[in-house]
């Protein structure tokens, strides 16, 4: 029987607290009726990103929240391990392209190795963000939806 996991010994511990990417201008001016709700969910989403990263034993965990399928209103949160410390200041709004758009369309879990990521027809190699964002070494995504769809 193995000893219980000691998080203090974990070399993949969080180096950077989760953060919410900068809002786009439209997020500040459109749909003010949901602004308070979105602001209130930031802490929960930050913890969810951290939990996803830790549970998956990954260097990066991410969570995106969309209201009504509207990418201009999306909130994106990251949790980074020490391995990704050099990306601590990376902030960009969610845009709903590539895999992010695909997982929203298929509404099914998706798990790919890096080779399968690169071979996938929706892979955009981060488009304009290539070289600026943390690298991807595989993909595990699950879309969670509310009872209203």
Image (cartoon, rainbow, N blue to C red):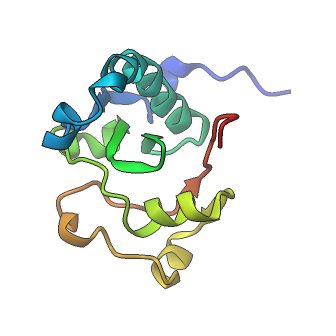
Q: Is residue 62 left or right of residue 57?
A: left
Indicate the position of residue 137 as horizontal and vertical percent values. 45, 62
Q: Name the one closer to the observer, 148 or 132.
A: 148
Q: Name the one closer to the observer, 109 or 66.
A: 66
Q: Is residue 2 above or below residue 73?
A: above
Q: Residue furthest right?
A: 1
Indicate the position of residue 129 as horizontal and vertical percent values. 20, 63
The residue depicted at 24 percent of the width and 40 percent of the height is 85
Q: Quadrant of the N terminus?
A: top right
Q: Is residue 24 visible from the viewing direction of this image?
A: no
Q: Is residue 38 left or right of residue 118?
A: left
How many numbered marks does the figure carry? Answer: 0
Residue 127 lies in what quarter of the image? bottom left
Indicate the position of residue 65 as horizontal and vertical percent values. 45, 38
Q: Is residue 80 left or right of residue 26?
A: right
Q: Is residue 144 above or below residue 129?
A: above
Q: Is residue 8 visible from the viewing direction of this image?
A: yes
Q: Is residue 114 left or right of residue 27?
A: right
Indicate the position of residue 143 as horizontal and vertical percent values. 61, 48
Q: Is residue 62 above or below residue 46?
A: below
The residue depicted at 58 percent of the width and 55 percent of the height is 140
The residue depicted at 24 percent of the width and 47 percent of the height is 93
Q: Quadrant of the C terminus?
A: top right
Q: Name the one closer to the observer, 33 or 60.
A: 33
Q: Name the one closer to the observer, 130 or 15.
A: 130
Q: Is residue 136 above or below residue 48?
A: below
The residue depicted at 70 percent of the width and 34 percent of the height is 147
């Amino acid at each position: 029987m193995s000893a219980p996991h000691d998080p203090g010994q974990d070399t993949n511990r969080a180096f950077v607290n989760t953060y919410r990417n900068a809002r786009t201008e439209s997020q500040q001016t459109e749909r003010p009726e949901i602004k308070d709700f979105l602001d209130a969910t930031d802490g929960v989403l930050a913890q969810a990103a951290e939990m996803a990263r830790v549970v998956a034993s990954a260097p990066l965990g991410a969570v995106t929240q969309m209201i009504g399928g509207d990418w201009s209103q999306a909130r994106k949160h990251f949790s980074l391990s020490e391995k990704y410390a050099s990306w601590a200041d990376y902030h960009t709004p969610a845009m709903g392209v590539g895999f992010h758009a695909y997982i929203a369309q298929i509404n099914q879990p998706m798990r790919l190795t890096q080779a399968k990521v690169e071979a996938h027809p929706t892979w955009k190699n981060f488009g304009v963000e290539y070289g600026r964002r943390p690298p991807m070494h595989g993909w595990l995504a699950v879309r969670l939806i509310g009872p209203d769809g």
